[in-house]
C-alpha cells in the first residue's frame, strides 16, 4: 500500500506534464484550430435535393470521386455544397450533421439528423447563389428529414468528425510525367489540405490540388514503392507508409491508414 501511494505521488507531476503535452499535441504554432474531435457549432442554412430517388446523378461530381467509390464509401449519404461552403473544392470530404429546422411544416416528425459527406458542388444559381450556405442533398438523404413536396427546407447544420470504414483510398491515374492521385474515404476532419508522397528513397514531395480531391505531381514515381502523408483541415497529419507496391499500375486504388 505504502509503496503504491508513494509511486503515485512521485508520478503525478509527471502525469500532469504528460497530460499537458498530450492536450497540446495538436495545437499548431500558427494558431490554427485543434484536432476536430467534437462537432462544431450549429448554424442555419437551407437544403434542397437533386438526383433520383435511388441516388442516381449523385455518385459523381465536382470533388472528383469515382462513382463506384461514392456508392461503396458514402452511399446515399452525400451532399453538394454551395460556393460559400465548397471553398473551391477544399471542403470536399467534410462531414456534416443536418437536421430540419424545428417548426417547419415540412419537417419529418422525430427530428432525425442525417450525416452526409460533401462530394459535389452546387453551382451558384437559385438557392445555391453566393453567399447562401446551401446543401443540395441526395434525394434519399433529404427525404429522411423532410417531405418531398417541400422542395426546400430551412435546416441547421454542423461540421462533425467523419467516421469512415477502412483506410484512406489512393487512386492513381494520369501518366508517368503527370500523376493524379484521388484521395477518398478520409476520416477525422475529412477535408484534405495537404498531400505528400515519397517514392522509394526519394525525399517527401508535396502534390498540388488539381481539382476537388485530385492531387497532381510531376515527380517520377513509376516503379517506386509509395508512401503518402495526408494533412486534414484541423492540422492532423497521418502517414501511410509503403501502401503502394513498386509494381503499381495507373488506374489502381490502394488503401492506407485512416484518421480516427
Ligand atoms: C448512411 O447513413 C445511414 C444512417 O442514416 C447508415 O445506416 C448507413 O450505413 C450510411 N451509409 C453509408 C454508406 O455510409
Image (cartoon, helix red, strand yellow):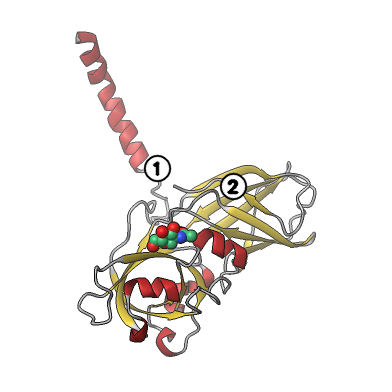
Where residue 52 appears, as percent x and y from the top left, is 50, 79
Q: From this viewpoint, is residue 168 visible?
A: yes
The image quadrant where one finds ligand 1 is bottom left
Q: In the visual, does 203 lie left or right of 125?
A: right
Nearest to the eye among marks 1 and 2: give it.
Answer: 2
Kindly identify which residue carries mark 1: 25
Where residue 116 appears, as percent x and y from the top left, is 42, 65
Callout 2: helix, strand or loop?
loop
Q: Residue at x 38, y 54 (%)?
A: 36
User: Which label belongs to residue 256?
Assistant: 2
Where residue 143 appears, as percent x and y from the top left, is 37, 75
Q: In the visual, does 233 lie left or right of 217?
A: left
Callout 1: helix, strand or loop?
loop
- Upstream in the sequence, badge 1 or badge 2? 1
Query: Would you place residue 150 above or below residue 232 in this image?
Result: below
Q: Residue at x 35, y 86 (%)?
A: 149
Q: In the visual, does 193 lie left or right of 129?
A: right
Amino acid at each position: 500500500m505504502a509503496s503504491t501511494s508513494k509511486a503515485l505521488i512521485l508520478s503525478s507531476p509527471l502525469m500532469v506534464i504528460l497530460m499537458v503535452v498530450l492536450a497540446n499535441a495538436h495545437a499548431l504554432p500558427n494558431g490554427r484550430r485543434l484536432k476536430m474531435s467534437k462537432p462544431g457549432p450549429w448554424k442555419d442554412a437551407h437544403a434542397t435535393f437533386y438526383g433520383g430517388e435511388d441516388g442516381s446523378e449523385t455518385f459523381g461530381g465536382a470533388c472528383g470521386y469515382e462513382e463506384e467509390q461514392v456508392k461503396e464509401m458514402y452511399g446515399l449519404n452525400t451532399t453538394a455544397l454551395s460556393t460559400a461552403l465548397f471553398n473551391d473544392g477544399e471542403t470536399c470530404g467534410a462531414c456534416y450533421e443536418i437536421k430540419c429546422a424545428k417548426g417547419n411544416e415540412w419537417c419529418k416528425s422525430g427530428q432525425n439528423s442525417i450525416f452526409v459527406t460533401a462530394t459535389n458542388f452546387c453551382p451558384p444559381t437559385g438557392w445555391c447563389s453566393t453567399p447562401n450556405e446551401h446543401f443540395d442533398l441526395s434525394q434519399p438523404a433529404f427525404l429522411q428529414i423532410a417531405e418531398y413536396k417541400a422542395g426546400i427546407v430551412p435546416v441547421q447544420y454542423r461540421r462533425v468528425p467523419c467516421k469512415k470504414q477502412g483506410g484512406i483510398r489512393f487512386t492513381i491515374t494520369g501518366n508517368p510525367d503527370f500523376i493524379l492521385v484521388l484521395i477518398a474515404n478520409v476520416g477525422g476532419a475529412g477535408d484534405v489540405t495537404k498531400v505528400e508522397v515519397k517514392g522509394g528513397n526519394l525525399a517527401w514531395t508535396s502534390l498540388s490540388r488539381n481539382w476537388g480531391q485530385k492531387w497532381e505531381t510531376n515527380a517520377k514515381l513509376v516503379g517506386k514503392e509509395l508512401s503518402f502523408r495526408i494533412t486534414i483541415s484541423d492540422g492532423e497529419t497521418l502517414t501511410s507508409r509503403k501502401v503502394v507496391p513498386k509494381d503499381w499500375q495507373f488506374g489502381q486504388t490502394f488503401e492506407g491508414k485512416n484518421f480516427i
